[in-house]
Image (spheres, helix red, strand yellow):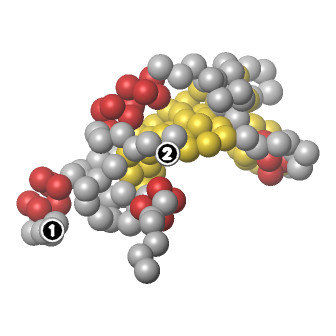
Amino acid sequence: MKTKKTYRDMIGDGKMPNKYWVALSNDYMYHHQDGKDNMVDWIGDIVPTFKSEGLTIEKPFSTYEKAKKFCDEIVIGEVCSYGFIVNRINIEDRLSGELYEKTKIFYPNDCSVEDWETEDFNFTKKTMEAKEKVFK
């Protein structure tokens, strides 16, 4: 009997066709002093009573651009249609795992939002086959 794979089984599994999932959560980073060191930690690691909420949109996007466009429409720090405040957005795919993250970071005197994309976004069928990896 063949079991159905969930999106969690597929993220980063290196198989084709590639798909892109968007995850939303209320987690955020907090900048603080630990002795003489500046630290940035997830709020749940600092405040044990923090209740993390979030979800992954189970319907995958067919391209990174479509997933990114969906993310760009979500406002960090506002309540989303799923009923929680979004402080973190991730895009993950089958070939390389996490590709994009946008996270709220609280500093003692202000709050900022930082985002990053993977530096090596060359995990497409075309570029992988150019490296002589054949997908069937």
Q: Is residue 75 above or below residue 98?
A: above
The amino acid type found where label 2 is placed reads Glu
Q: Which residue is mark 1?
A: 136
Image spot of residue 99 (x, y percent): 41, 46
Q: Nearer the viewer, residue 22 or 4?
A: 4
Image spot of residue 30 (x, y percent): 75, 37
For the question of whether residue 135 can be seen, the reply is: yes
The amino acid type found where label 1 is placed reads Lys
Question: As drawn, which residue projects farthest toward the front?
Answer: 1
- Left or right of 18 on screen, residue 28: right
Q: CA distance from mark 2 to mark 1?
A: 25 Å
For the question of whether residue 36 can be seen, the reply is: no
Q: Nearer the viewer, residue 12 or 109?
A: 12
Q: Is residue 105 above or below residue 46?
A: above
Q: Which residue is mark 2?
A: 58
N-terminal of the pair, mark 2 or mark 1, is 2
| Quarter of the image with the N terminus in it | bottom left
Are the residues flagged by discs 2 and 1 in contact, CB closer than 8 Å? no
Q: Look at 36% across and 40% down and name the residue there.
A: 61
Image spot of residue 96 (x, y percent): 37, 58
Q: Look at 49% across and 45% down and name the residue there.
A: 58
Q: Look at 21% across and 52% down and name the residue there.
A: 124
Query: What is the crowding at mark 1: few (fewer than 14 residues within 10 Å), some, or many (at least 20)?
Result: few
- The disc placed on residue 102 is none
Q: Look at 25% across and 56% down and name the residue there.
A: 17
Asked which secondary structure carries label 2, the reply is loop
Question: As drawn, which residue projects farthest toward the right?
Answer: 49
